[in-house]
């Protein structure tokens, strides 16, 4: 579908997801900005530059994504993941254009083993990053009605540091590895999120909250084992509990995002195989 070319502003264009968004939206008139082109924490400059540009859609993939560092950089995380989103939503409303924004499974506390639907209202983050993303969700919804809030989880892609690349590196260095086995989530490929975003935008789907994750679930340990299997790396992987691998930020135990509104994405195993083959 689609037809008409859209003038789309992609923010966070050099990030892991942003780079894939630039790729899939080719054919439209794309403007990709990252921190160098515009620091989103300068609110008035952001407003001036976007109003001059007059895009027809804003896609915000910019974020503060260092989950553990956020524990010590609360103000910056809340600014970039929270207040910046409110400012962008205000600008989108004034221009009367849609805005796409991404959030995370980490806005939930992970106590619900069944998984979280799009309309779940028990937003109860366990760490500062989750709190900052929850503030972004709130300010987005308060400042405009024309929003797509797309929650994603356990992201990997070719343009950023991620769990898959960490495992491949460790696989070359070690013959045994301990990996957390009591946190469950849905590993998700940026390429699939980018493609789904394009469908949502071009098909003018109803505004609201969506969950875009690869189908199925795994623990970090299960995810790691599959990476090594597919990459044909011979390594012993030992399952360990969260307590045995302490990190500054607390993580949810069960952060399954249920996708009840969009067509399901392919399984996480299939997506991972595609990523590793490319
Ligand atoms: N990664 C995950 O596992 C995961 C999971 C769930 C949800 N998400 C969400 O998915 C979205 C995309 O994540 P990602 O992993 O692709 O992020 P990423 O690779 O960290 O990219 C974010 C981009 O935003 C830029 N940025 C940061 N501060 C900025 C500022 N003040 N002004 C302008 N640009 C700024 C960053 O530039 P610098 O690098 O120069 O700072 C970077 O290029 C985010 O909303 C994230 O919260 C991610």
Image (cartoon, rainbow, N blue to C red):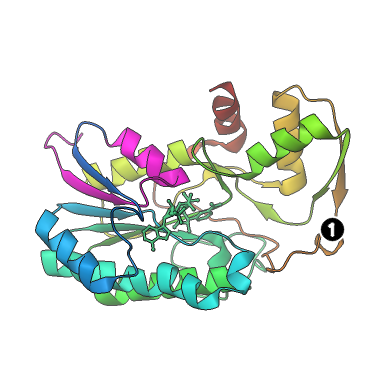
Residue 24 in sight = yes
The boundaries of the magenta stretch are: 1-25
Residue drawn at x 70%, y 62% is 253
- Looking at this view, is 196 or 249 the one in front? 249
Residue drawn at x 52%, y 54% is 258
- Picture layout, residue 3 above or below residue 100: above
Numbered marks: total: 1
Q: Is residue 17 magenta?
A: yes
- Looking at this view, is 76 or 183 the one in front? 76
List the residue tagged with mark 1: 241
Q: Is residue 181 left or right of residue 69?
A: right
Q: Position of residue 234 (x, y in %)?
A: 84, 25
Q: Position of residue 174 (x, y in %)?
A: 85, 35
Q: Position of residue 6 (x, y in %)?
A: 15, 42
Which secondary structure lies at badge 1? loop
Q: Is residue 3 left or right of residue 190?
A: left
Q: Is residue 92 magenta?
A: no
- Looking at this view, is 115 or 72 the one in front? 72
Tell me where residue 3 sits by quadrant.
top left
- Picture layout, residue 172 above or below residue 52: above
Residue drawn at x 54%, y 76% is 74
Q: Is residue 109 left or right of residue 22?
A: right
């Amino acid at each position: 579908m689609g037809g008409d070319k859209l003038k789309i502003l992609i923010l966070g264009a050099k990030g892991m997801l942003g780079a894939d968004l630039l790729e899939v939206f080719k054919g439209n008139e794309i403007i990709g900005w990252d921190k160098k082109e515009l620091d989103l924490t300068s609110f008035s400059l952001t407003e001036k530059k976007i109003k001059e540009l007059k895009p027809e859609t804003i896609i915000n993939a910019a974020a503060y994504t260092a989950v553990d560092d956020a524990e010590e950089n609360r103000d910056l995380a809340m600014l970039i993941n929270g207040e910046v989103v409110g400012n962008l939503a205000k600008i989108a409303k004034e221009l009367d254009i849609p805005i796409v924004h991404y959030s995370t499974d980490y806005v939930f506390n992970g106590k619900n083993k069944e998984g979280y639907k799009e309309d779940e209202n028990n937003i109860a983050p366990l760490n500062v990053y989750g709190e900052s993303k929850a503030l972004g969700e709130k300010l987005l919804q308060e400042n405009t009605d024309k929003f797509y809030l797309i929650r994603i989880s356990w992201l990997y892609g070719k343009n950023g540091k991620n769990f898959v690349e960490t495992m491949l590196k460790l696989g070359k260095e070690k013959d045994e590895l301990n990996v957390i086995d009591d946190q469950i989530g849905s590993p998700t490929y940026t390429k699939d999120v980018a493609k789904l975003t394009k469908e949502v935008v071009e098909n003018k789907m109803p505004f609201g909250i969506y969950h875009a994750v690869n189908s199925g679930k795994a623990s970090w340990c299960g995810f790691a084992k599959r990476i090594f299997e597919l990459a044909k790396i011979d390594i012993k992987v030992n399952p360990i509990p969260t307590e045995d691998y302490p990190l500054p930020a607390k993580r949810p135990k069960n952060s399954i995002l249920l996708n009840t509104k969009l067509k399901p994405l392919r399984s996480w195993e299939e997506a991972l195989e595609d990523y590793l083959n490319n």
